Image (cartoon, rainbow, N blue to C red):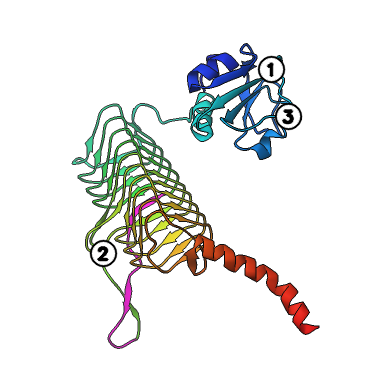
Amino acid sequence: MDSMQHTAGSLAELIGARLDGLATIVCTGVSSLSEAKQGDITFMVSEKYSRDWKQSNASIAVVPNGIEVPNHDGETRALLWVEDADVSIAEVLSLFEVEVDQPALGIHDSVELAPSAKIGKDVRIGPFTIIEKDAVVGDGVCIHGNARLARGSHVGAGTILHSGVVIGHDCTVGENCILFGNVVIGADGFGYCASLDKTHLMKIPHIGNVELGDNVEIGANSCIDRGKFSSTIVGSGTKLDNLVQIGHNCKIGQNCAVSATTAIAGSVVLGNWVQIGGNVGIVPHVVIGDGAKIAAKSGIMNNIPAGESWMGLPAVPLKEGLRQWAAVRKLPKLITQLNK
């Protein structure tokens, strides 16, 4: 957390906002509009929330340009008008972020370290971590306890691995990544075939690896399977939520955002800047174009062109899906009328 005392005026300067109100108000915390206390800064992302400004106890609010805020008293409170509220929210929250405890600088005595492993400078490696032969740990890497880096794995500079993370053999994690608890990179893909005599399922070996770009963030308990022949790839800047499954040989582009409990089957290709809502399922070999958006709980069974938004199960373009949804809502009334 930033120890500096912030005021409405200093915050406006920090985030490049236009100040409307009292510049000397001291900011003591961050909260939602409804739960804020006096001294708190809050955020109003639409006029739906700006109507509640009068009733809120917050002293300062970040507001996008062009939104009306009725009943604002500039003598006692302050509004910070900004171009992009989301970016400004991130900047303000970073000032109040509490530092996470880290392992001590150096390598804990309990770490199992192979002689052939290469360890960079200024690393923090917590207790009971296992680093196998030929693994590489870059400069400034932080590994919390009970992690495992398998043979030939590579973790780039500045990356943070939280407790229980497993990096499979020959897999690569880029620089400045964050992998939260119990993430598994490089498990075998889900591949089986029936034996010739049809008595059992035969396991198909997966001899590829996983390659993560730089600045990738992966939420807790997510899994990325290694490729069957080549690499499963996650592009730089991509963010995966908790409990996300990426199948073998997927190619995920840069700066994608994938929400929790989404399951992406093998050999799916995502372009750059794709956004996927929670609990989405995607069948194998689908191609999703740059900038596409997929609504939560959708089932993707077809390719999606770049820039399009889809929804539903099976998923269809957004406008068609909304029409289907509206029609289904009318069915009970229509059935009642037919019965009469």
- Neighbour class for label 3 at 10 Å: few (<14), some, many (≥20)? some
Residue 56 shows which numbered tag?
Answer: 3
Q: Of helix, strand and loop, which one carries label 3? A: loop
**Horizontal side, residue 251 vs residue 309: left or right:** left
Q: Is residue 49 magenta?
A: no
The one nearer the camera, 34 or 246, is 34
Marks 3 and 2, how far apart at CA: 56 Å
Give me the C-alpha separation between circle 2 and circle 1.
63 Å
How many numbered badges does the structure rendering display?
3
Q: Residue furthest bottom?
A: 197
Residues under labels 1 and 3: Cα distance? Answer: 15 Å
Q: Image height check: is 168 above or below 98?
A: below
Q: Amino acid at mark 3?
A: Ser
Residue numbers of the magenta segment: 183-198
Q: Is residue 187 magenta?
A: yes
Q: Are marks 2 and 1 in contact (CB under 8 Å)?
A: no
Mark number displayed over residue 74? 1
Quadrant holding the C terminus: bottom right
Q: Name the foreground residue: 333 vs 121.
A: 333
**Residue at image coords 65%, 24%:** 40
Q: Which of the 4 image quadrants contains residue 47?
A: top right
What is the x, y in percent for residue 24?
62, 11
Which residue is nearer to you in this view: 295 or 154? 295
Residue situated furthest right in the rendering: 340
Residue at the image position 34 percent from the left and 49 percent from the top = 272
**Amino acid type indicated by mark 1:** Gly
Q: Quadrant of residue 263?
A: bottom left
Which label's residue is closer to the chain start, 3 or 2? Answer: 3
Residue 108 is situated, as x and y percent measured from the top left of the image, at: 35, 33
